[in-house]
Image (cartoon, rainbow, N blue to C red):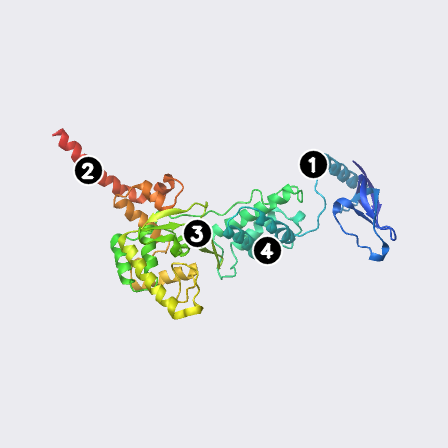
Amino acid sequence: MTGNVQKRYGYWRVVIELGEQAALRCPTCRKRHWVEDGKPSTCPADHGEPEEVVARRQEMLPEKYEAKKEASKALRDALTARERGEHVSRDDRTTGDYLVDDWLPTLEALELRPNTKLAYRLHVEKRIVPKIGSIPLQKLTYSDIVKMHARLASEDGPRGHVLSPSTRRGVLAVLHKALAEAVRAKLILTNPADGVEYPKVRRTGRLETWDADELDKFLKATSSDRLSPLWMLLSKTGMRRGEALGLKWEDVGLDTGSVYLQRSRHQVGYQVVEGPLKGGDGRHVHIGAGTVAALKAWKAQQNTERLRWGSAWQDTGHVFTRENGEPWHPNKVTESFGEAVSAVGVKRIRVHDLRHTHATLWLRAGGHPKVLQERLGHKSIKITMDTYSHALPTMQEGIADVLDAVVYGEAR
């Protein structure tokens, strides 16, 4: 590959000689369209069918130089980069065009959970494109991405608050992933998101949970509430909010005292998504007699509402529904739990903390950690023990007392 420098309109320009290449040439106006560009002919239809030809092709680089010496150096650098495979063809598309029109559609061919695809789209369309979408992809810099992140960390979003560190980590991860694909497609030479520092997500050392008396007080005080069976199921099984809201009656064995968790109903942004559990594996969870009785009473109430609503009833098969059969929105459940906690007057915890409460009470009651791991759906026992290590000192004290009594008795 060769090239030269030419002076045009007072500036020196670099011209790369690409050699002879296949092209389509209009028989009337003689315009050429290089075959590899995939560009349709822009000539009028009455000009006739384009002719297949082989023609000499040149590429003039966009930069302009005051001095010939500068242009000559740029020519040498350009030729060296192409020989090393460090060159990308000029592309004028913006970062937004690439992300929305090129990258997002490729997600459909990937085996991703629906909520993951939705989260990617939300990050791109609502958080990335409004900040840096107008910047040409090939001119996007590390500095542009750092400034974007600074704005996300300081400006209120559509819901009136600054994005959490966890959400901002997700935004940066999605952008890095998309730009990595642009590098592989040879649209850009390097990934400008490389090295961008992700925000730290601080985790509190101790989980907020209720003791047995607080949980008992709450369940008794809310026993007549519409969502009482849900509060009982969450606190007595440790399942996640989305797993409970995704339950259908076909998953519940009231005679056998077990439920089969195989889907989750949760939100991305405010949009509700329902799909398989993370990892794709379902699990069986045993429920006690009290929980079975609560679900039986709830099912009878739901059947009464079904008859009352008639054809207007939304027959989705979900266990937990509103009066018309519509499944609950996860956010509404969270709001209702907060209102119930305030009304009862117990320590304020999140709805997800019912899961932690169940795990803590299980371990302190002497329940086996391996069984708890299976109930919670953790991938390993290490996750379970690391998460609920706060319950272990009490367990150790009890076991130590037993061993001490046994060993001391034998010694006497």
Q: Residue at x 33, y 57 (%)?
A: 231
Name which residue type carries label 1.
Gly
The x, y position of residue 404, in whole percent, is 18, 35
Q: Does residue 202 lie above or below 83 as drawn?
A: below
Closer to the observer: label 1 or label 4? 1
Estimate the spatial distance between the alpha carbons at disc 4 and disc 3, rounded to whole Å: 35 Å
Q: Is residue 318 visible?
A: yes
Marking on residue 402: 2
Return the disc, 3 or 1, that comes first in the chain's sequence: 1
Percent of width and height locating residue 38: 74, 48
Query: Which mark is in front, 4 or 3?
Result: 3
Q: Residue at x 39, y 50 (%)?
A: 261
Please, what secondary structure does the residue beneath circle 3 have? strand
Q: Residue at x 38, y 56 (%)?
A: 249
Q: Dot 2: few (<14), some (14–19), or many (≥20) neighbours within 10 Å? A: few
Query: Toward which corner of the image does residue 180 lie, by quadrant?
Result: top right
Counting from the top left corner in percent of width and height, residue 252 is at: 36, 53
Q: Which residue is mark 1?
A: 85
| Badge 3: residue crowd in 10 Å (few <14, some 14–19, many ≥20) | many
Vertical order, 76 against 265 (above or below): above
Q: Residue furthest right?
A: 28
| Left or right of residue 102, residue 335 in this image | left
- How many numbered callouts? 4
Q: Disc 3 marks which amino acid? A: Arg
Residue that lies at the very extreme toward the top in this rendered image: 411
Q: CA distance from mark 1 to mark 4?
A: 31 Å
Label ID, residue 263: 3
From the image, which quarter does the C terminus lie in? top left
